[in-house]
Structures are given as C-alpha cells and as structure tokens.
C-alpha cells in the first residue's frame, strides 16, 4: 500500500514517536474532511470513502471495502471524523514504515478495530484480512499466533496482542540500532578510503612536482 504522490495526505507529517498529527495538521485534515462531506452530515458514506481512498492510495476496491467495514464497526454505513483521523494516521504510519510503532502506541484502538465481533478476541482470519494495513507478511502472522496465542484458542486477547506489540517494537528498535551502527561503520570506511585516496593523490602529485624540479635543476646545471 502506498500513498499517491501529490495527494493531500502526502504533505501531512506524522510524529515518529507517538504516531499522531500536529494540531495544525489536524485542523487541515478536519477542513479536508468537511470538503469531502458533500452531504454536510459530518460523515462519509461508503461511496465517498471509496473515492477518497482511491484518490490518495493504490488500494484495490475490495481492500477499500474491507477497510470501510472495519471502521464502520456499528454498521451504520458511514464513518465520522474520529474514524477518518485514525485511518489517516494508519496510512501515514504505513507509508513511513512506522506500522509497528503505530500498533504499539495505539494498541487498544487497533485491537478494538480488529475485534470485528466485539468478543474481545482477534481471530487469525480477521487479522489476515487487514494485515496489508500493517505490512505484516503471512509467515509473520502465523508466527504471531504461534508465539503469542497463550490460551491456544487461535485468537488473541488484548493482553496477548499488547505483548506482541511490545516485543515487536523492541526487536524493531534493536534492528534499527544495528542498521544505524552498520551505516555509521560504512560511512567511516568510505571516509577512510576517500582520505587514503586523497593522500595517495597528493603524494603522487608532489612526486611529479619533485621530479619536474629535479629535471629543471639538471637542465640548469648542463647549461
């Protein structure tokens, strides 16, 4: 899933720690929501919602329909600004590779959205439908239920889901630190090679100048 370059959402900034928009961005988003709300009901129906997501993302029609059903948890056929804001933060997190951070920071709202039946459990089938929003691979989803389904009912309660987000973000932070360390080492290595090359070039240049000076001295002596 990607945001389309040049769309309104492309210019919004998502805080990388808390995965929320700034007050200024929220105001801008509220104005955008009111523009989309052509019926002036402070809601978006499924048709308006489809055209919005089709305009700003590359999601397919079936995926857009699934997302709308997830947000329209009380099945009224419309979503309000609160659900709209949640979706936008989710999309921006996905775009900026902050899916794990988003789930960690907003574990309760995410859990409630994925709990389609309202029985305080997330089934593997339900999670499978929405994994594209969080960039979770099939094998990762299998591992998730294998490692964190403590009760063994092939469903996650909130405590199990929260534990998953904590461990996931911990692994992610360790991986990022390792990558940053490797990146720093590569930069130092490149800098060292560059400096070594400059030193060699300088020596070569000085050597040529010295040879030329010696040649000139020999010519003067011959004269």
Image (cartoon, helix red, strand yellow):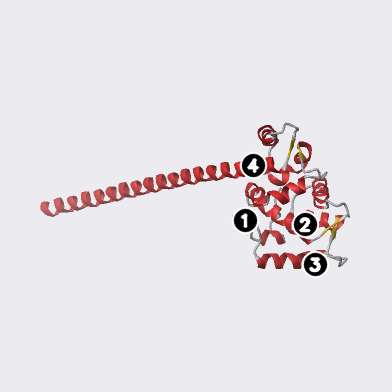
Image coordinates of residue 67 in percent, x first then y, are 79, 49
Q: Which mark is residue 83?
A: 2
Give how far apart the Cα atoms at labels 3 and 1 are: 27 Å
* Label 4 or label 1, whichever comes before in sequence order: 1
Label 1 close to label 2 by CB (< 8 Å): no
* Label 2 or label 4, whichever comes before in sequence order: 2
Give how far apart the Cα atoms at labels 2 and 4 are: 25 Å
Kindly report which numbered mark, 4 or 3, lies closer to the viewer in this rendering.
Answer: 4
Give how far apart the Cα atoms at labels 1 and 2 are: 18 Å
Q: Residue 163 carries which label?
A: 4
* Tag 3 residue: 35
Give how far apart the Cα atoms at labels 4 and 3 are: 40 Å
Label 3 close to label 1 by CB (< 8 Å): no
**Quadrant position of residue 170:** top right
Local secondary structure at mark 4: helix
Image coordinates of residue 130 in percent, x first then y, are 75, 44
Which of these two is toward me, 137 or 109? Answer: 109
């Amino acid at each position: 899933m990607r945001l389309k370059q040049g769309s309104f959402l492309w210019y919004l900034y998502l805080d990388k720690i808390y995965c929320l928009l700034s007050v200024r961005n929220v105001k801008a988003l509220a104005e955008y929501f009111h523009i989309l709300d052509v019926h002036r009901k402070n809601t978006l129906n499924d048709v308006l919602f489809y055209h919005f997501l089709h305009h700003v993302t590359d999601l397919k029609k079936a995926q857009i329909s699934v997302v709308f059903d997830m947000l329209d948890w009380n099945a009224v056929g419309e979503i309000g600004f609160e659900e709209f804001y949640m979706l936008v933060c989710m999309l921006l997190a996905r775009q900026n590779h902050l899916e794990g951070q988003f789930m960690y920071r907003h574990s309760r709202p995410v859990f409630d959205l994925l709990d389609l039946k309202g029985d305080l459990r997330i089934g593997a089938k339900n999670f499978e439908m929405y994994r594209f929003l969080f960039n979770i691979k099939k094998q990762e989803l299998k591992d998730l239920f294998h490692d964190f389904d403590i009760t063994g009912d092939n469903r996650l309660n909130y405590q199990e889901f929260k534990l998953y987000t904590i461990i996931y973000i911990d692994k992610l932070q360790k991986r990022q630190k390792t990558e940053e360390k490797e990146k720093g080492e590569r930069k130092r290595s490149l800098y060292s090679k560059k400096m070594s090359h400059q030193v060699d070039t300088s020596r070569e240049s000085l050597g040529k100048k010295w040879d030329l000076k010696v040649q000139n001295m020999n010519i003067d002596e011959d004269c």
